[in-house]
């Protein structure tokens, strides 16, 4: 009887601790929350795409998309995947990519860039101007990242742990 009582008490104490784990940082589903609107960084304060003193210079002719409508960071077996949906100025933008600007103070800075169409540009509906891109974060790099920030021309969105 005493053994059953002690065993039952131990099981109840163990199960009561599970409620705390579901809301803690140990649960991978809680690592990144919903995205929030963030202030736009002044272009003069942005770091250059090509660091000074680099021998190979590759210029990126893509522009920042007009705005970001949604941002999500999902856990993956190899780390995390950042997915962003933005709205371009007109239809036809292509070659979209989330370009890394580095990690500063635990914040991964990404820019949402896309190539402007070279031919006729049609304004179109907001739905037809949507463009999406993703960025994979390696598991080793993820340990130093607390917040993901994606920058567009008129707004930015962040998602943090």
Image (cartoon, rainbow, N blue to C red):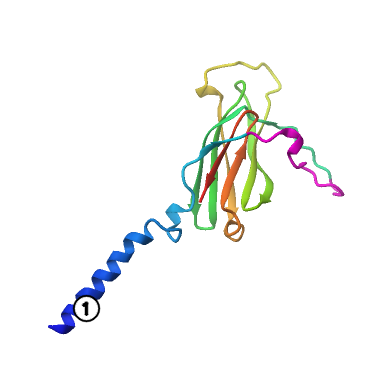
- Quarter-of-image position of residue 154: top right
Query: 125 or 51: nearer the eye?
Result: 51
Is residue 92 rendered to the left or right of residue 50?
A: left
At horizontal 55% and vertical 45% (from top left) the residue drawn is: 82
- Helix, strand or loop for disc 1: helix
Asked whether residue 44 is drawn in magenta, I would say: yes
Task: Provide residue 143's location: percent of width, then percent of height.
Answer: 58, 59
Label 1 Cα crowd, 10 Å radius (few <14 / some 14-19 / many 20+): few
- Please, is residue 9 above or below residue 44 in the view? below
Task: Provide residue 7's location: percent of width, then percent of height.
Answer: 21, 78
Is residue 61 rendered to the left or right of residue 23?
A: right
At horizontal 62% and vertical 22% (from top left) the residue drawn is: 89
Asked whether residue 55 is drawn in magenta, I would say: yes
- Quarter-of-image position of residue 2: bottom left
At horizontal 53% and vertical 48% (from top left) the residue drawn is: 160
Q: Which residue is mark 1?
A: 7
Query: 134 or 6: nearer the eye?
Result: 6
Q: Residue furthest bottom?
A: 2
Q: Main secondary structure of the magenta part?
A: loop
Q: Magenta part of the protein: which range?
A: 40-56
- Please, is residue 49 above or below residue 153 in the view? below
Number of numbered markers: 1
Task: Provide residue 63's location: percent of width, then percent of height.
Answer: 70, 30
Q: Quadrant of the N terminus?
A: bottom left
Task: Provide residue 74's location: percent of width, then percent of height.
Answer: 49, 48
């Amino acid at each position: 009887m005493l053994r059953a009582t002690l065993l039952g008490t131990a099981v109840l104490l163990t199960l009561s601790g599970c409620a705390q784990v579901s809301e803690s940082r140990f649960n991978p589903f809680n690592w990144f929350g919903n995205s929030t609107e963030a202030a736009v960084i002044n272009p003069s304060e942005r770091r250059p795409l090509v660091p000074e003193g680099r021998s190979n210079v590759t210029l990126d002719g893509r522009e920042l998309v007009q705005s970001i409508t949604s941002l999500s960071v999902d856990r993956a077996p190899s780390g995390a995947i950042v997915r962003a949906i933005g709205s371009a100025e007109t239809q036809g933008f292509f070659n979209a990519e989330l370009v890394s600007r580095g990690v500063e103070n635990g914040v991964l800075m990404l820019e949402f860039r896309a190539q402007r169409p070279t031919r006729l540009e049609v304004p179109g509906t907001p739905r037809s101007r949507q463009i999406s891109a993703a960025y994979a974060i390696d598991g080793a790099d993820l340990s130093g990242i607390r917040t993901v920030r994606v920058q567009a021309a008129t707004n930015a969105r962040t998602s943090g742990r």
